Image (cartoon, rainbow, N blue to C red):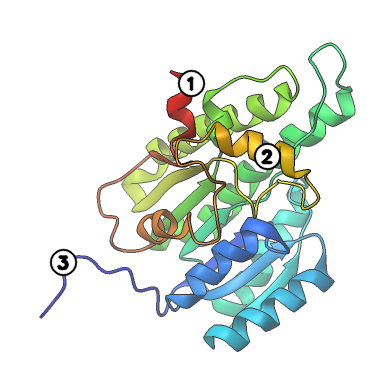
Amino acid sequence: MEKTVNFGLSGKVAVVTGASRGLGVELATSLAEYGADLALMAGNEAKMQKVAADITARTGVKVITVKVNIADEESVRNAVDAVMKEYGKIDILVNNAGIIRYGRPEEITAKDWRECLDVDVTGTWLMSKEVVNASMLERGGRIVNICSVNSFSASPAAPVYHVAKAAEAALTKSCAAAWAGHGIYVNGIAPGNMQNGEMAPDTPPAILENIRGKVPQRRLGQYGDLSGALLFLASEANTYTQGTIIVCDGGLILESF
C-alpha cells in the first residue's frame, strides 16, 4: 500500500555544516540512515574524515568531506562548487555550524561579538545563498537551520549568542518567504540543552543537575532527540511547512512563561 508520507532520502544529496563533532555528526548520521549521500563541511578536515568513515561503515552511503571557513564568502563558494562537481546537485542543506561567546554586554570584546555573528548568522546566510544559486533555484530543495531556544530568550552572560540565534530565526523566516515559490522549503530546529551540543564534556555534575532541573522532562537532550524533526523537514514528508522553527527542548521554553 502506498504510504501517505515519505521520510526516505535515497537519491538525495545533503550538505551538513559543522559536521566534525557534536550535533553535526548526529544530524548527518540521521540523514545517512535514511539513505542520503552526504557532503560534510567543517574547518577540521581530520575529524571530518573520521566521521565520514564511521558514517559510511555504518550506513553504506557515499560521504565526502569539504573544508570550509563558514564566515568567508570565497571559501563557502568554493566548498559548494566542490559538492556540485562531485554530486551535480544539492537537495538538502543543514546549517548547523555555530559558536557561542560569553561576556556581559559591557564586557564582551568586539572580536568575540563579530566572530559569533559571522559564524551563526552570516555563515548561515552565505551557505544558503550559494546552495540556492548553485542548485535549489532550479531544482527546489530543503534547508534546515539549527537555531536554538535561545533565539527566543535573553541572557546577561551570553548576549551575542542570543542576538545571533534570534537573527538566525529571522533569517530562516525571511529566506522561506523569498524562496517558497521556487520549491525551496526553509525551516529551523531550536534545540534546548543538548548533551551532544555545546555542553562541555567536563561540565560538573552539580551544574548538569541544575540544568536538568529547569527542564520539564528533567533531562538533557540525548542523541536522536532532533532526528524526527530533521527527517520531517528534510524529506518529502514536509509538503506545507514553511518558515517554521520546531522547538526540541524537553519543554524548557515553557518554563519561561
For the residue pair 129 and 100, the one nearer the viewer reads as 100
Amino acid residing under circle 3: Thr
Q: Quadrant of residue 4?
A: bottom left
Pointer 3: what residue?
4
Pointer 2: what residue?
120
For the residue pair 1 and 179, the one nearer the viewer reads as 1
Q: Is residue 2 visible?
A: yes
* Residue 62, above or below 18: below
From the viewer's perspective, tell me whether residue 62 is left or right of residue 156: left
**Element at badge 2?**
helix
From the viewer's perspective, tell me whether residue 35 is left or right of residue 14: left
Task: Name the quarter where the N terminus is drawn.
Answer: bottom left
Task: Assess disc 1: are there few (<14), some (14-19) or many (≥20) residues with their C-alpha within 10 Å of its C-alpha.
Answer: few
Q: Earlier in the sequence, mark 3 or mark 1?
A: 3
Residue at figure coordinates x 73%, y 50% from the top left: 70
Pointer 1: what residue?
256
Q: Which callout, 2 or 1, points to the residue nearer the camera?
A: 1
